[in-house]
Amino acid sequence: MTADDFDFDQALDRLLDTPLESRDQVLSLYEQTHPEHAKRLKRLLAFAMADTSLPTSVDALAPALINTMFDAADMERIGTRVGAYKVTSLVSRGGMGVVFRAERDDGVYAQTVAIKFLPRLMATERRRELFLNERANLARLEHPNIARIIDAGVTDDQLPYFVMEYVEGESLDIACDALSFDERLTMFTKVCDAVSYCHQSLIVHGDIKPSNILVAEGRVRLLDFGVGHWLMDDQGASQWHSGFTKAFAAPEVREGGMHTIASDIFSLGMVLLEILGRSTNVPLADDLDHIAQRCLQAAPDDRYASVAALKQDLEAFVEGYPIRSRRNERGYVAQRFLRRNKLSAIALATTLLGLVVGLMLALWQYDVAKQEAIRAAETADFVKRLFERAGEERDSVDEITLRALMDAAVLRLDDELARSPSVKHDVMALIASGYTSLGDYEASRQLHESVLAYHLETSESPSADIAVALAAVANDMVAVGEYEQGLTRYADALGQLEASGNSDSLAMADVLGRYSLALYTHSRSETDAQQAKALLERKGKILERVAPGDFYLAYIHLANVASWHDAHAEYQEAASLKEQAIAIAESHGYGYYPSAITIRCNLGYSYDGLGQWAKAVEAYRSCIDRRTVRLGDQHPGLISAYQNLAVTYLSMRQFREAKALLKTAAAKATDQLPENSVTRLAVELNLARVLIRSGESAEALVALPSIMARMSATLGERHPAAARVRSILGKAHWEVGDYDAGLVSLRRAYADLEDSAIWAFEGNVWVSDVTVWRADAELSAGDVVVGRELASRGLEYRQRERNVPGWRINEAEEVLRRASLDE
């Protein structure tokens, strides 16, 4: 390599941005890799740092050159104070500033920070004005992979500075020298998380490079927002064009253009190549090379549209899924569909794998094996044709939805698989599982019932096929409130597995888990609770025997057990088990599986039960973010996640936030779920609750009659959920002054709930609400005796609620106070 080939600018930038204590290590690396250039590089470094050991002639010139960016006074800052901090030592110098270590020195508490002073040439009046306007926005950045900005200001000599969290670590490229390929990729995805968070906060970084990314104790921290800027000013245009590092800058930035999200993505692509390709000298896998090249496109519009999209492709690469960068290649339509709809993919994979395993075990039965092979081939061929046709019929792959493909498949089943009934019903079960994931239990149940009828007709009872079909129908029944019928089907499924010799199988473990869930979620008797616990314990023992190293099944089982504790208000035990489940999922590569994401939502429920609302909000937000990245922003799973978060905000009396989330969830539910979906009805009902709490009872009253009618039709007029709707309807009538209708509804709701098993459940919010609201109505109607008795009960019920917010206690106490005054 000639001197012309070696990029001295890039090498010098890297050295200047490396902390002093690590600089010798980088120099040593250059001496090994580029010995013919290392000597000159050392001289350049010494020149840039104004080293007094240089020859006199150079020494005389260096300060004059350096002062264009850094005043000699910078070196005199050691020992001085900046705000509450005392500068103690120099950390590094680079093209975009000089960084010092400092200690808090005001006696309030001990704290080590880093203070970065921006170059003096940047300290124009306009830049100082933008800097001061921006500092509050930068200081609010809170992310585990971003070095926190604590304060910012301007010195007496008008030099802008940042006070940042002090991170004592190695730059990303140096840290990656000791890491495996997979570990480097994991580090890079954390960087993507940080940059994506900045972009969501309308901040671009502008100088992403390895030396601005430190790794300390395995944790990545993104540094140096001195060149970051607010995307838009009051006039709607970017204003602050700052410096950058040429080797990692996008072409448009090098040519004088503005920093944008697209330019940050280009820089991320350069960093990815630096830590994976150039540093290892290992050719990148095809998919990974596609990802990098997509980042590095010359035209900004040809790059990834967001860092989230970049990270999504990286995660697809890690998990072995197709990437979006190659979506136009032949065969990717079907693969991408399966990737976005993991439930269906797992079902299909399980079917095919089961057939293959069965084939291998039954080679000696040639005729049976031949039929099974044909069945597998026909199943795969039908699904392949379905995906290919869907792709041909759409203008864009992104327009293909799970619902559209399933609906199309149902229409083609009879025509294309009439001669292969076993394949037809395999596919039918797969489609039914997809409908279940969308919450369309009516469509799911129709198909599951057909599959069950087929196996009852063609399989000799008892059999595992009949058992699996029975459990699927039971699941649909329980989902729509037919608990007794569903529990009977689950019991029948267990009997089929026992009698067919499958009592120690994964199929048995799955049915045990589903059966126990139905018991502890929908029954309130102690007998049912103990039976559910016994079923879970049996499931755990089966998994230990037949799948001891299956971490996927392990974390799912932990989550099942945690839900049992939730149902019994044992929220601390539930939270602990869910945290363990998440840790297992994360450490074994399942962190973005839909089931693992759902556990994060369920963790929010446990935190809510403990009164740890901030943690609950964090868990729900994490669930929503991951679900959006993994499944897209239109996935039905987001509906329940929005609702759960809104209910937590309701407990916190943050009605505006709750209303916004529920309106979003209701709009999605209207578009994606049938009108009798229990999930959709729950979202609409909770929105009515929030509207009443926000003083908008008239608006709630418009929606509640429809909710009442649909809930009664779906679950029955005397069902507890229908009584809950009736109680909220009564409250809305009362709030708008329709006292007669309100009192009638509240009395009917009270009676229906009192007759149900739910009344015995300690701390039930439905029970306490109807009691307190009816007490208030009876007092206003003049029945002081009944009102006082109900007010006393209502307060007692509220005090038994799990993690009852203070405002709910106050509301009940106020009604009881009124009752006492009316005596």
Image (cartoon, grey):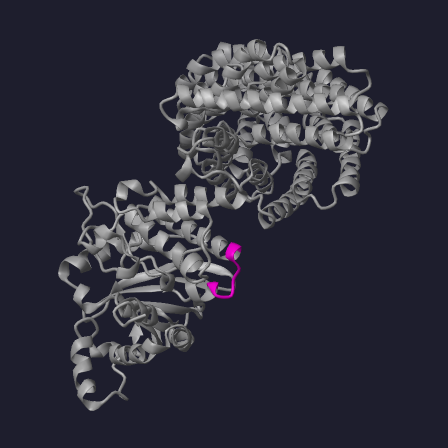
**Measured from the top left, where is residue 433 in percent x and y?**
60, 23
Q: Quadrant of residue 529?
A: top right
Q: Is residue 505 above or below residue 194?
A: above
**767 left or right of 202 in image:** right
Bounds of the magenta segment: 176-182
Q: Quadrant of the N terminus?
A: bottom left
Q: Residue at x 36, y 52 (%)?
A: 269
**Measured from the top left, where is residue 250 in percent x and y?**
27, 52
Most extreme residue toward the bottom is 56
Q: Residue at x 46, y 32 (%)?
A: 332
**Measured from the top left, where is residue 12 in percent x and y?**
30, 71
Front residue (pair 742, 35): 35
Does the rendering let one see residue 771? Answer: no
Does the rendering let one see residue 597? Answer: yes
**Measured from the top left, where is residue 147 in percent x and y?**
40, 59
Q: Quadrant of residue 721?
A: top right
**466 left or right of 407 in image:** right
